[in-house]
Amino acid sequence: MNEDALSAAETLASIGGEHADRSERDRTLAPEVASALAASAIPSMLVPSELGGGERSPGEMVEALDLIARGDGSTAWCAMVAATSGLVSAYVDSDFARDAFAPPAVAGGVYAPMGRATADGDNFVVSGRWPFASGCRHATTLMGGALVTDKNRQSVRAMVFLASEAAIHDTWDVTGLRGTGSHDIEVSELRVPAGHTASLSDDRARHDGPLYAFPPFGLLALGIAGVAMGIATGATGDLVTLATAKKPGGSKRTLAERSSTQAAIARAEALVGSARAYVGEAVGEAWDAACANGEIGVDGRAKLRLAATHATRSAAEAVDLMYEAGGGTAIYARSALERRFRDIHTARAHMMVSSASLELAGRTRLGLETDTSQL
């Protein structure tokens, strides 16, 4: 990871952790955290360099998000959404992208086709309401996926617009990742120029380079995995801190001296370490293919999704081990492990790392006919 991204990740981990209680209470990032994110190199990591972005590799993105999540899961999740949303800059009109995605812009939104759009000359007229718009209260640019019908053909396009053009509905009252402010956003009869839209499954990026050979959905899944691995690493650190000081009731030994605690720590370390290695392998192979051929084959794309899904599920298992080992202390809202437990299971619920991703990867490995558009 380059020095700017590393420094930004470490800073966001520290500030996010310091203000995690307020972010959780307010159900959106604390102002200090949102400002630090906007001022950092993270939101523009995947924006083309010629548009003023960082154009960093997927591996660097995963590493940065992993570091941030060790401080606070909600901060890392919003950073992930901002970074992966920035990838859309490579698919839309360049002049617009410079304003909408280059620093200090912070992008967000939802690609799921919860909207409807009709063509009107060089514009689309779009209406829709999208849930799970993480970071929408501090974003400057938003997008919403819309189903477009044109001459009996339907397609899904991301409609990109200014955050000020969308209404926010306060809906984010949930179990975990409460600080992400993932409320609903809505637009009605909004005119969006055609050059401000993109199909992430059908269009090719307007910029060259190995980064833009990566599948957008695969990059999103990798971002989720980075956050999940960071949450799990943070949880093992939380348990180490707790275990070296806590003496369970009626015991003269610390929690750390219990063999069950020692085994749980070892298992968690192995789960996350092996997941991180598999992600690194999948990303490295895909990067080599993108550099050599300008594209990543179906097997490579399937491996990216498999590695991301496996990492997220392994991270959840590791956090569960730490939460259980923490005993009664971990159930209190003041416990860092309690928040890690809620955050990781909320992250795991994302469709990009669901069991359907395992099925996609399994079908391709078995040579079965498969819809690979979501890879």
Image (tube, helix red, strand yellow):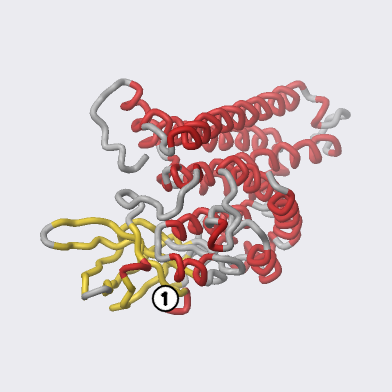
Q: Please state if 153 lies on the left or on the right of 165 as rendered.
A: left
Element on which disc 1 rests: loop
**Type of residue at label 1?**
Ala
Residue 213 location (% of width, % of height): 44, 43
Task: Identify whether 368 is placed above or below 131.
Answer: above
Residue located 46% across and 60% down the image: 89
Q: Is residue 370 left or right of residue 239?
A: left
- Which residue occupies the extreme left position in the image? 152
Looking at this view, is 372 or 78 the one in front?
A: 372
Residue 138, x across and y down, in percent: 57, 70
Q: Who is closer to the viewer here, 70 or 56?
A: 56
**Residue 149: image x %, image y %?**
18, 62
Q: How many marks?
A: 1
Q: Where on the picture, by quarter, is residue 240?
A: top right
Q: Where's the N terminus, which quadrant? A: top right
Give the crowd class for mark 1: few <14, some 14-19, many >=20 residues within 10 Å: many
Instruction: Name the one closer to the observer, 39 or 110.
Output: 39
Q: Residue at x 65, y 25 (%)?
A: 270
Q: Is residue 227 visible?
A: no
Decide if residue 323 is in sight here. Answer: yes
- The residue lying at 50 percent from left, 53 percent from top is 84
Q: Quadrant of the C terminus?
A: top left
- Above or below residue 245? Residue 25 is below
Residue appearing at x 62%, y 53% in the figure = 76
Residue 107 higher or lower than 187, as above or below: above
Q: Please determine whether, in this image, residue 305 is positioned above or below residue 350.
A: above
**Image coords of residue 245 (percent x, y):** 86, 38
Quarter where residue 37 is shown? bottom right
Relative placement, left or right, of 317 versus 352 is right
Q: Residue at label 1?
A: 166
